[in-house]
Every structure is written in C-alpha cells, then in structure tokens.
Image (cartoon, helix red, strand yellow):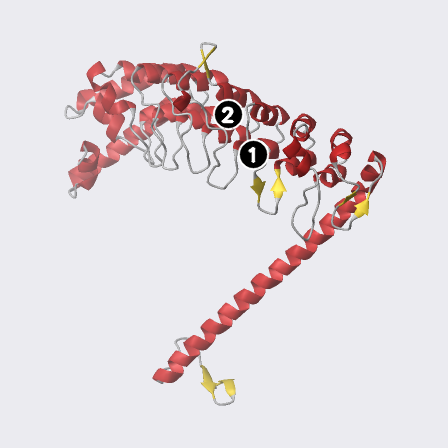
Amino acid sequence: MTKMAQIKSGKDDARYKEAQVAQKWYGDAIKMAMENKYAALETHIKSYLDTHSKFSIVDILVDFKAEGRTLLHMAASSGHVAVMNMLLGMVKKSDMKTIMNITDDKGFTPLIYATIAESTPITKKLLAEGADVTNVTKDGATAAHFAAGDGSVARLATLVKAGAQVNQLSATGTPLHWAAAQGRADVIKFLVEYRSDNEFVEDKNQRVDFNVCCPNGSPAVIMAAVSGCDAGVETLLKAGADFTHVMPGNLTLLHICAENGLVKSVEAIVATEAGRKLANTKTNSPHENTPIELAAMSNVISVVNALFPVTSDSCGADGKTYTTVEAVLLDGPRLLQQWTERERILSVQKEKSEAEACGWVCRCRYFRIQAFYTRTGSQRPGCDRRVTSGGTSNQK
C-alpha cells in the first residue's frame, strides 16, 4: 500500500485530518503547477517534506494524485517547461525510472501528455530522462499517435528516433491513420518515407505499413480522402497504397475522392487500368451512384472533366445517358435531390422499423410479466391490471 493510501485508509481522527491536510496541500500544488508558479511550487514541496519526514519527493510524484494524475502529468499537460525542470531537478538520477513512466487512470504517461500539449522541450526532456516512448494508453495509443494527429512532423520525428513503434495499432488505428483522419499531409509524407536524418530507413520491419486497416475497417488512404486531404491521398497512392479497397455500400476510394473534389487523387487513380474500371462502379442500391455522379452532385467541374473520358455513356441508377461534361454537371442538382429524397425515405423506414421492434419487445415483455403473475396468482406490484379470459381489465 502506498503512503498516500495508508493515510486515506486510517480510521482514527488523526489520520483523517492528515488525509484532509494532504488533499488540501496537493490541491494547492496542482494550482501552482498549472499556473506556472514553479518557484512557489518548489517552496511548497520543500515545506511539506520538511514537516513530513516519512515522505520523499518520489512519494509526492508517485502517490499524490487527482483522478490518477500526478504533478508530472500536470506539468506535462500544461506545457510549463520551468515546472517540469524544477520537479525533475528534485529527483535523484537513480529514482528517475520510478517516476518517469507512471500512468494515470487512462494509461497516459507524462510523455504522452507533453505530446498532446505540443511541448517539444518537455517531450525531449522526458525522453532524455528515460521516458519509454513505447508506452500505450488503455486504448493502445502511444505518444506517436498524438504527434501524428496534431500534425507535428518535428515532434513525431523526435519520437521515432527515440524508438516509437510506427505500426502500433490502437483502438482507432496506427499513427498513420491518425494523421490521415486529420488530413495531415506532411505527417503522411514523413511516415510513408520514414526518414531519419534525410536517409531512408533500411530496416523494412520499421517501415510504415500504409495498407493496414484500422479496427473500423478503413485503410489510411480512405481516411485521408474522407478528410479531404488530396496531397495525403496522392502521397499514399504514389507509395503504392491499395486504391481498390471497398467500403460498406460498395463505396470505393474513387467515389470518396470524386465527391470531395480531390482532383489530383482522381487523376492518379484513373491513370491506371484498375482505376478506370472503378470509374463505372456503382454504389449499392438504392442510390447506385458512380463517381462522376457524386462529383456532379458536388459541382466539382475539374473532377467531372477527369472522369468523363473513362466513364461509360450510361451511368447511374436510372440509366441516364450523358454525352457531354456539361450534361453531367447540369444533371447534378437533380441527382442530389434524388439522393436526398432516398436518404429521407431510408431514414423514415429505419425509424419505423426501430419503433416496431421496440413495440414488439415491450409487448412481449408485458405479456411475459402478466403471465408470471397470473400463473403464480400474485398481484403485480404497483399495478392492478390482470389478465382475464377476455383480455386485460382494470380491477377497481
């Protein structure tokens, strides 16, 4: 049991008062840390240690917590370099391992918080003191995931050089998925090339796997397209990302790029034979739209121009024939209205189906309960409704 836990577990008045004093002291310490009052915080800590000889600085940095977060977590999340330097300066080198990788209730370490706070100085300081760059949160994310998501190539490069696992799969994907989902083109480029001092990493096992799918079934190239990152999609395609992946509803990468107006990506896809076949692929019923139709609905002229030469004359759910680019664009508003109406109908049908299912569940449950009380001859608590041979009736 930790020293802080021993204080809190005491049943006598003295220990209870001691716990209250400790909680008040820690609350004040948190406030000083978050307000960057490092000098006052140092005095605050030394004063407590002087009057509580059984405690050490390691005990304070490990056992004193608020929602699982220690002063190191607070200092890292605030991005206050002076506070972090002061706290680490009070710790012996031999004790650094004990405090450096402590996790909060969500599995976040000080290094992860420093990355989230976008504090490169604290990130470097923690790494220099032995922070484990491979530590994962309860969702499987590392500091590299957060650096990739916020778009910092410099911070991500620092973590990668320190040994970050670039293919670590979290509940929402790898660092590449995080970058793609946020449309971070520079980070996508860095991860695809994975450079170290401007030299390609030779170890193929350390290369980023850009075709792996995140748990929801999406590869990074699809996520980049959804986020509208044309440059990111283009980078992944040039690196050899699989553009034939099909999402639910028979939705392809070309459909998404066309709808979002990613002209460079569209051109890269249809430049291949497999890509040209996708140009005539329809989404599932009831919409059955081709990529060019989605582009027309979004009124993206450049994409319609790129797709027209590789799209058959007859396309779409209603088999309408287009002979010119202008004809496709003019039909865009009609297609959009048609799509919207179909979505409305689907929504109504779904709500009706859910309501009916809920009704049947409720009715089935009601009759099961009534059958029980009828069978046992007992009265249902709070209800005087009984099942009779003629149905149900209220007994007054």
- Quadrant assignment, res 315: top right
Image location (x, y in percent) of residue 269: 65, 30
How many marks can you see?
A: 2
Question: Is residue 7 shown left or right of residue 254?
Answer: left
Q: Is residue 265 left or right of residue 368?
A: right
Amino acid type for the residue under numbered disc 1: Met
Residue under label 1:
223
Q: Of 305 and 3, which appears nearest the observer?
A: 305
Q: Give left or right: position of 37 versus 96.
A: right
Disc 2 marks which residue? 150
Q: Is residue 248 above or below residue 257?
A: below
Q: Amino acid at mark 2?
A: Asp
Residue 13 visible here: yes
Does any portion of residue 35 appear in the rendered image? no
Ranked by sequence position, the earlier of labels 1 and 2 is 2
Q: Secondary structure at mark 1?
A: helix
Distance, label 1 to label 2, CA atoms, is 15 Å
Of residues 319 and 177, the one nearer the viewer is 319
- Vertical arrangement, residue 232 with respect to residue 92, above or below: below
Quadrant holding the N terminus? top left
Residue for point 62% across, 23% down: 231
| Residue at 19 percent of width and 41 percent of height | 9
Q: State which mark lies toward you, 1 or 2.
A: 1
Q: Is residue 190 above or below residue 334?
A: above
**Quarter of the view holding residue 83:** top left
**SS of the residue at dot 2?**
helix
Number of other residues with Cα within 10 Å of mark 2, as a class: few under 14, some 14 to 19, many 20 or more? many
* Front-lying residue, 68 or 238: 238
Percent position of residue 261, x then y:
70, 31
